Image (cartoon, helix red, strand yellow):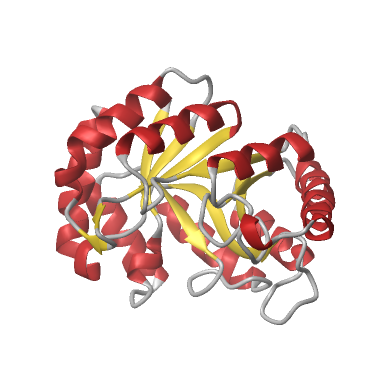
Amino acid sequence: MLKSGPVPLTFRQLSPKEVVELVRKSGLKGIEWGGDIHVPHGNVSAAREVSRMTKDEGLEIAAYGSYYRVGCEGQENVPTFDSVLETAVELGAPLIRVWAGDRGSDKADGAFWAKVVEDSKRIGDMAQKEGITIAYEYHGNTLTDTLESVQNLLKQVDHSNVRTYWQPLPHHDMESRAKGLEEVLPWLENIHVFHWINLERHPLEGGTEEWNKYLQMIQGLEGERYALIEFVKDDQPEQFLKDAETLKSWLRLD
């Protein structure tokens, strides 16, 4: 089953309360709260308050979008996983999104791969004790930047609690994106939804044909996951509300 929601990074200028009110108005079901602005890593009081206001409006916590770089703990601007996990627990997040390192697969040597694999297993174990799933961001300049690399990583980690997101990579055509999605289906958690043309944001409605193909591939999977609107044209709340209607129509939600 696919549920709907946003990733509020497109609304960093809004307070958590304003985000919650906007999402409630949109009719979407959950929110992936980010660890950069709205729920900073280690700020458990903020996590507790954001969790309360989210649930008070009848919304769900879809995930905690952290900026933890797997295999890079101790580096500047990389939070400790202890602080990330503590925050996710207070937030009531069922999943923590993490980044598979700090470099693309073409720049990663064997030693770096080994660090990311080892750390993935470590945080997978830690999160599992709290009933929280780990999922990689599917993104460039990390070890999930190509189909071959993300499969290689997931197979090497081989941990039941370490999975992945998916999103359409910018410089790929629809067929290669669909192939990439098909190959990660056994490990798939949430997906990030947006419509870009030449790296420019466009209304979601323009991507209907393409996204219907992707969503049909996902709908039959067991369990629950979220389709989360990530980027909104011009970061405008009015456009977000239109995009929310589009997403709900794709998912056949009222």
Rendered image quadrant of residue 45 = bottom right
Viewport quadrant of the C terminus: top left
- Percent x, y of residue 23: 30, 54
- Residue 161 visible: yes
- Percent x, y of residue 212: 26, 30
Question: Which sits in the foreground, 200 or 88?
Answer: 200
Above or below, 28 relative to 142: above
- Percent x, y of residue 63: 54, 50
Above or below, 203 relative to 227: below
Residue in the image at 19% along x and 33% along y? 209
Q: In the drawing, does residue 77 fall left or right of residue 21?
A: right
Residue in the image at 50% along x and 49% along y? 61
- Residue 254 visible: no
Q: In the drawing, does residue 132 fall left or right of residue 186?
A: right
- Percent x, y of residue 83: 74, 67
Residue in the image at 25% along x and 35% along y? 210
Viewport quadrant of the N terminus: top left
Residue in the image at 54% along x and 40% along y? 147
Q: In the drawing, does residue 125 fall left or right of residue 102?
A: right
Q: Residue furthest bottom?
A: 76
- Number of numbered markers: 0
